[in-house]
Amino acid sequence: MLPLSIDEQDRKLRAKCPQFRLVAHGGWMGVWEGTLTPICQTYRVRLVYFSRRYFDGWHLNNPYISIFVIDPPIGPDPRGTGEPPQHVYRLGHPPEFPRLCVYDPIEDDWRPSEYIVDCQMALLP
């Protein structure tokens, strides 16, 4: 199946989560920012989506979708218990800004022909 365009992803994401805005559109790459309030703390979140990773003669090593909490920073010990936060990828990312684990990029079980908001964003209302 063909990947969904940035505009297609944007329409569905904003319909379900109007607090998110497309802040960068590069044709095959889009960036959204918005807020989430999972319990009582509000977080500013950034979604980075690549509709394609394969080009003539080269391969983009980024996952199709990455989600980061940008404010307040999660940090290495957000609860002050000495325990790192769960469901984050830290390797290759600053300790304050790990990537959220919403799917397994090693399994690569998500496709850009699927809507982000339907498949990856169970944390969204």
Image (cartoon, helix red, strand yellow):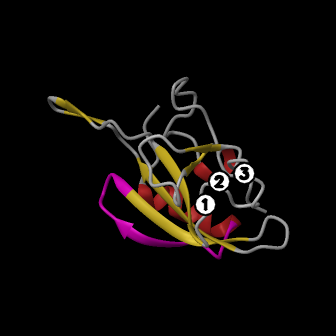
Q: Could you tell me which quadrant the C terminus lies in? A: bottom right
Q: Please give left or right for residue 92 compared with residue 15 in the image.
A: left
The quadrant holding residue 42 is: bottom right
Return the residue found at the far right: 39
| Residue drawn 70% across the image and 65% down it | 16
- The answer to whether the residues at label 2 and label 1 have Cβ atoms under 8 Å apart is yes
Q: Secondary structure at mark 2?
A: helix
Amino acid type, mark 3? Gly
Q: List the residue tagged with mark 3.
A: 82
Q: Please give left or right for residue 110 compared with residue 82 in the image.
A: left
Q: List the residue tagged with mark 1.
A: 12
Mark before the other along the chain sequence, 3 or 1: 1
* Magenta-drawn segment: 17-29
Task: Calculate the distance from the C-alpha at mark 3 to the C-alpha at mark 1.
Answer: 39 Å
The quadrant holding residue 18 is: bottom right
Image x and y of residue 117, in percent: 65, 53
Are there few (<14), some (14-19), or many (20+) residues within 10 Å of tag 3? Answer: few
Q: List the residue tagged with mark 2.
A: 117
- Judge whether residue 69 is colored magenta: no
Mark before the other along the chain sequence, 2 or 1: 1
| Residue drawn 35% across the image and 40% down it | 52
Q: Please give left or right for residue 73 compared with residue 58 in the image.
A: right
Image x and y of residue 44, in percent: 60, 72
Image x and y of residue 57, in percent: 14, 29
Return the residue found at the far left: 57
Front of the two marks 2 and 1: 2
Amino acid type, mark 2? Val
